[in-house]
Image: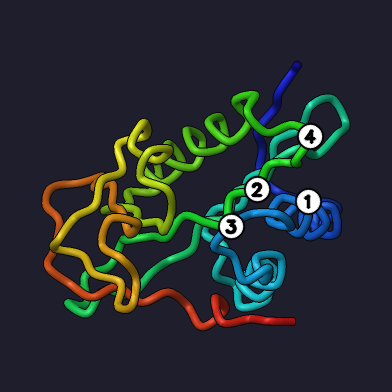
Amino acid sequence: MNLLVRNENPGDVDAIARLTEAAFADAPHTSHTEHFIVAALRKAGQLSVSLVALDGNDLVGHVAVSPVTLSTGQSGWYGLGPISVRPDRQGRGIGSALMAAAIERLKAMGGAGCVLLGEPGYYARFGFRACDRLVLPGVPAEYFQALPLAEGVPAAEVSYHAAFEASA
């Protein structure tokens, strides 16, 4: 595998939608709206980071990162996700490469931190941990995880952009 991770470009948009829909088709704990969420974030100008993974000419992965709002008003925090890998290519390090690239991009942007909603056993390897100082209402605390990129984690309630309510 010759993996290249790069910024999305306009020619990737349809392939990203198809990939994201396929990646979540059989996933547990999903609303099957992830491809709509990415499109709504893009339309709203809220994709702070949108990276694709290519193996040759094949688009095999995508990660989206968007700003989140903290009840304290502190800025510089982002939400990672959705992250998608083509189903027939999962388990080969593509998701890990996208995660590492997205985290590095956030550091380069001067991000204060990143949150995500996901499986603790998977995301712990990237430094994400459940943090009782940051709360996403209605979500079990162990699945809402944070990675501070600067000093300190504020005590705050986190809100994602309205695009995360997209259903079409």
Q: Which residue is mark 1?
A: 19
Give left or right: position of 105 versus 155. right
Q: State whether residue 94 is above or below residue 148.
A: above
Separation of residues labelled 1 and 2 (CA atoms): 7 Å
Q: Which residue is mark 3?
A: 28
The 10 Å Cα crowd at callout 2, few under 14, some 14 to 19, many 20 or more, is: many
> For the N terminus, which image quadrant?
top right
Separation of residues labelled 1 and 3 (CA atoms): 17 Å
Look at label 1 and name its amino acid: Leu
The answer to which image quadrant residue 61 occupies is top right
Mark 3 and mark 2 in contact? Answer it, CB < 8 Å: no
The 10 Å Cα crowd at callout 4, few under 14, some 14 to 19, many 20 or more, is: few
Return the residue nearer the eye: 13 or 126: 126
Separation of residues labelled 2 and 4 (CA atoms): 12 Å
The percent coordinates of residue 166 (x first, y second) are 63, 81
The percent coordinates of residue 140 (x first, y second) are 30, 65
Upstream in sequence: badge 3 or badge 2: 3
The answer to which image quadrant residue 32 occupies is bottom right
Give left or right: position of 74 versus 94. left
Look at label 2 and name its amino acid: Ser
Please name the residue shown 85% across and 59% down the image.
14
Q: Which residue is mark 2?
A: 84
